[in-house]
Image (cartoon, rainbow, N blue to C red):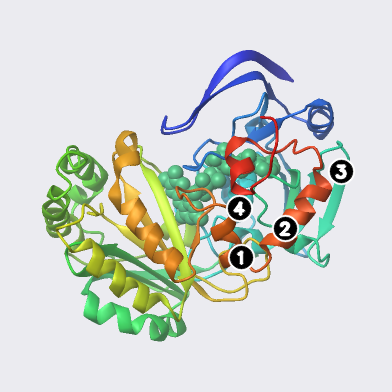
Amino acid sequence: MNQNNNGTWVSWNENLTHNYKTLYKISSEKELQDIVRNSEKIRVFGNKQSSSDIASGAATLIDIKSYNQVLSYSDSEKTITVQSGIILGDLIEAIEAKGWCIPCLPDINTITIGGALATGTHGTSGKLLSEYIKNCSYILADGSIKEISAKDQLMDAFKVSLGVLGVLSTVTFQCESIYTLHIKEGPENDKEWLPKIKERLKKHDFLRILWLPHTNKGYVITGDKINPELKIKEELGSPFLRHRRKASKILYKYTHIFPWFTAIANKLLYKGFFSGTKEHKGSLYQATVTKSRGSTLELAEWTIGLEEFPKVFEELKTVINKWSNKSFIHIPMDIRFVYKDNSWLSYAYKKDTVTMGCVSRNAASADSYEAFKSIEKIFLKHGGKPHWAKRFKAKDSELSNVYEKWDDFKLLRKKLDPTNKFLNPYLTELFNEKTNN
Ligand SMILES: Cc1cc2nc3c(=O)[nH]c(=O)nc-3n(C[C@H](O)[C@H](O)[C@H](O)COP(=O)(O)OP(=O)(O)OC[C@H]3O[C@@H](n4cnc5c(N)ncnc54)[C@H](O)[C@@H]3O)c2cc1C
């Protein structure tokens, strides 16, 4: 075990900083248990990539990234058991080497499994990552180990639990046989793609729409499972397309001072990077997950029932297209689809759901990014839910309106952590708890 005293914790994009008394790097479950048992206030963090202030802000911190081993496989059941600090990219490589996959992946491979599961991380055209958990073990506030299997009712509370019910120690994922997707991408007018969502969800195995605000266009990505040997006409576009993030960074550089310039930048980015078509094939991981990030950014994401989405989308579009407000939004707004589940704090609790991302490519000026405020106002009004890892202002009173199981979750939290060991100031406010931080 490695220990550092009296330092400063800084998040990935440097938007959040906290002083700590002790920071531990651990590599065994026993170390994890001992530290949790003996700490008054503790947070565990992964790759620090969340925009919300949930990963630090306690006297004791644990960096979980060195607790990252693959523990076992079951070939007959297609399961893999790992320690919670493993990086998603390493997990997927281990799974793909077996000829398996997890059939719904987020757009980022550098996050830890502990961080991803705690915050309800999802991909598209499938379920939250946490729905693929078969068994897991948590270290509770008193240092004891709690084993939970998919059959236990408690699993629905633990699956997405913001690291406030305990620390995830190990997890067994139920995998499926790997498959190959034939991906087709191209732009469409909003009038075309919006009414086709349900039809496309039935027709395709993968659907994602990168909406391009202030252009009236969406960039539609569909994927169909094919025989891996099938020859397709591959079209990856010009090598220039690789520079999209760099070009965005330059074009948006001063949009915190001149927000209206975003509308012009978006039209240029559309012409340069989204007006062509592409066709390719690969595993879900190869074909859809971004493997490198050149720039820092700040994110919000809101979710809404599939049925309500078209109405909310039109309202959002009307609001942001008014030049009288400053809600100009950087490209793209990522529209994805998550199928219903039973997890208490899931965005898709008992409802098929659409998720809509909102990015500020100037992380440092994200506090004044008007778009985050507008999107929150509109989605909350229609019963939308925020992504736990991303930026939002809603707290207990708003969240209790949109989460049917909010109060049950709070009761369980209080029972498992009566001294609020796992609450930092942000989470204390979120759950409307009183505590000495
Ligand atoms: C560029 C980018 C792309 C993204 N793409 C997607 C996407 O496609 N889909 C999506 O849903 N999200 C996405 N996210 C959000 C991302 O999945 C979350 O922010 C995730 O939590 C980051 O993992 P991390 O390892 O950095 O966790 P951290 O930010 O370090 O921690 C997140 C939370 O998990 C808790 N935690 C960490 N480990 C444990 C553990 N072992 N036990 C209990 N709690 C723990 C922490 O205390 C904290 O509350 C994206 C974020 C970025 C920056």
Front label number (2 vs 4): 2
Locate residue 392, reporting x and y percent. 46, 50
* One can see residue 183 in this view: yes
Mark 3 Cα shell of 10 Å, populated few (<14), some (14-19), many (≥20): some
Front label number (4 vs 1): 1
Mark closer to the chain start, 3 or 1: 3
Mark 3 = which residue?
145
Mark 2 = which residue?
409
Is 215 displayed left or right of 120 in the figure? left
- Judging depth in this view, the residue of 280 and 133 nearest the camera is 133
CA gap, disc 2 and disc 4: 38 Å
Locate residue 107, reporting x and y percent. 44, 53
CA gap, disc 4 and disc 3: 31 Å
Say which mark, if any, is on residue 403.
1
Q: Amino acid at mark 1?
A: Tyr
Mark 4 = which residue?
97
Q: Helix, strand or loop at disc 2?
A: helix
Labelled pair 1, 2 in contact (Cβ < 8 Å): yes
Question: Going 42% across and 29% down the picture, which residue do you hit?
Answer: 14
CA gap, disc 2 and disc 3: 20 Å
Mark 4 Cα shell of 10 Å, populated few (<14), some (14-19), many (≥20): few
Is 311 displayed left or right of 228 in the figure? left
* One can see residue 232 in this view: no
Question: Going 12% across and 59% down the picture, which residue do you hit?
Answer: 271
Question: Going 69% across and 57% down the picture, which residue do you hit?
Answer: 159
Say whether mark 2 is within 8 Å of ligand 1: no
Q: Amino acid at mark 2?
A: Phe
